Image (tube, helix red, strand yellow):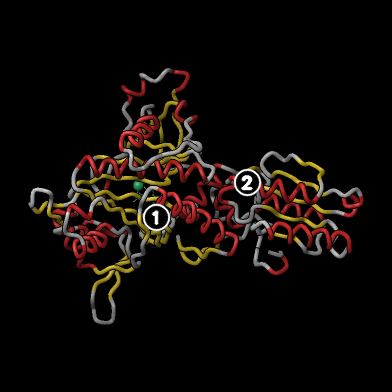
Amino acid sequence: MRLTRYFLPVLRETPAEAQIVSHRLMLRAGMIRQQAAGIYSWLPLGWRVLRRIETIVHEEQQRAGHIPMLMPTLQPADLWRESGRYDDYGAEMLRITDRHKRDLLYGPTNEEMITDIFRAHVGSYKDLPLTLYHIQWKFRDEIRPRFGVMRGREFLMKDGYTFDIDRASALHAYNRHMVSYLRSYERMGLTAIPMRAASGPIGGDDTHEFLVLAATGESEVFYDDAVTGLRLGNRAIDYDDRAAVQAVCDEFTALYARTDETHDPVAFAAVPEARRRVGRGIEVGQIFYFATKYSAPMGATVVNAEGQRVPVHMGSHGIGVSRLVGAIIEASHDDRGIVWPEGVAPFPVGIVNLKQGDGAADAACAGLYAALVAKGIEPLYDDRDERAGAKFATMDLIGLPWRITVGPRGLAAGKVELTCRRTGESEEISPEAAVDRVAQVVAGR
Ligand code: ATP
Ligand code: MG
């Protein structure tokens, strides 16, 4: 993409309404525009990051054997009357009446709808286990929308629903979600710690939240610092192997890590003092096993191996896709701007032409651009007629992981400059070597 043909409305001034760094940087980098309290347009750069996060979530869910689909944003109120949540949900639910005076709502979550789909089409234990998920916009009329996309009213969520014949099988589904979530967050460059949680309006006893440590987080967290060093890395995981998946979950939940809702001061006191930490965290996901809470009242049953009709065991599992954009920035920025982890960067590399209009510099940039595209990499090429300082400031603000700087002086020696946004380190190398280096990093992400 050439910057002169793109739409990147960066702001020079720091917007006064933004209280936290991720919100400020998203506005300054031209990623979002607020349309109403807690409701945002995703401008082209923001949209690209959102799509990267969605792609990672899709890939990791399908790797775990979970099936993508799409349910609507609007739901009939009657489904929620069946579960009893139409009244329980209260003012957070956006209620809508259509021209025939039928009650609808903008879905805050989809347990009722997926249960309805299940009961219409599944009747036997032989069709289980089943996990269906979608990535869809939700609406919750939050009393205090704030922090940009972190606490919006309209927000994008991945929500998955598991159907199993019994508790043991449902807990395996729960564990698959924990592991696939850990893997997703790691690919986004995040450390998200699973913490035992309280269940709230969705219900259920077994539930963990995933928290990204950040001073601006809304949850107070208590943890053993050793938990922050755990990594899945590239280890192979067989999602059908119950014991292996359980072992990974045990590894990641053995150390003390709780939110204020479930904090146990006595257990915390057993953590070695030097490793005891109290901090704040951003909730980027939550998993629940809630047995037959929805299936029993809504009649989602299957015939089991003994020929009896029994309610199915369910769980629901969410990732805050749009909140993650803010959470990643909270965890990865410096005083010049965003520092995108490779996995979610809107463009993997930027090209800065120091002397636009200079024949050799323009040709070298065009050559780099074509060579990157030939390797399946789309660069963002700053081809504006601007000072070098302004171009560097824009690149630093929007946080692309790599920058290739092209100028007449370097070119005379056959070199361009490759700069890493995270470390600030630069190297003078040939254009071919720069392309190869970027291609290597992109292939590994
Ligand atoms: P919170 O406690 O932050 O209000 P929640 O526990 O009500 O969130 P869940 O029902 O667990 O939310 O939804 C799954 C995920 O969706 C959350 O972990 C969070 O990442 C995201 N999410 C929830 N509410 C919002 C919101 N208002 N704006 C953006 N993301 C949200
Ligand atoms: Mg939650």
Taking depth in this image into account, of 77 and 188 the one nearest to the observer is: 188
Residue drawn at 87 percent across, 49 percent down: 414
Kindly identify which numbered label has been placed on residue 430. Answer: none
- Tell me which residue sits at (52%, 52%) in the image: 325
In front here: 45 or 41? 45
Judge from the rendering whether residue 95 lies leftward or rightward of residue 146; answer left or right: left
Q: Which mark is residue 158?
A: 1
Residue type, numbered disc 2: Val
Q: Quadrant of the N terminus?
A: bottom right
Q: Residues within 10 Å of mark 1 (few under 14, many from 20)?
A: many
The image position of residue 285, as x and y in percent, is: 39, 46
The image quadrant that residue 370 belongs to is: bottom right
Q: Residue at x 51, y 41 (%)?
A: 190
Within-10-Å neighbours for mark 2: few <14, some 14–19, many 20+: many
Mark 2 or mark 1, earlier in chain: 1
Q: Does 390 sit above or below residue 2?
A: above
Determine the residue located farthest toward the bottom in the rendered image: 99
Q: Amino acid at mark 1?
A: Lys
Q: Which mark is in front, 2 or 1?
A: 1
Mark 1 secondary-structure assignment: strand
Label 2 element class: loop
Q: Is mark 2 within 8 Å of ligand 1?
A: no
Q: How many marks?
A: 2
Residue 330 in the image, given as x and y percentages of width and height: 54, 44
Q: Is residue 336 above or below residue 43?
A: above
Please give the name of the residue rendered at 33% of the width and 31% of the height, measured from the top-left corner: 263
Q: Residue 277's x, y, as percent?
A: 45, 27
The residue where tag 2 is placed is 339
The span from disc 2 to disc 1 (Cα, nearest Å) is 24 Å
Q: Seen in the image, is 388 located left or right of residue 421?
A: right
Between 407 and 104, which is closer to the camera in this rendering? Answer: 407
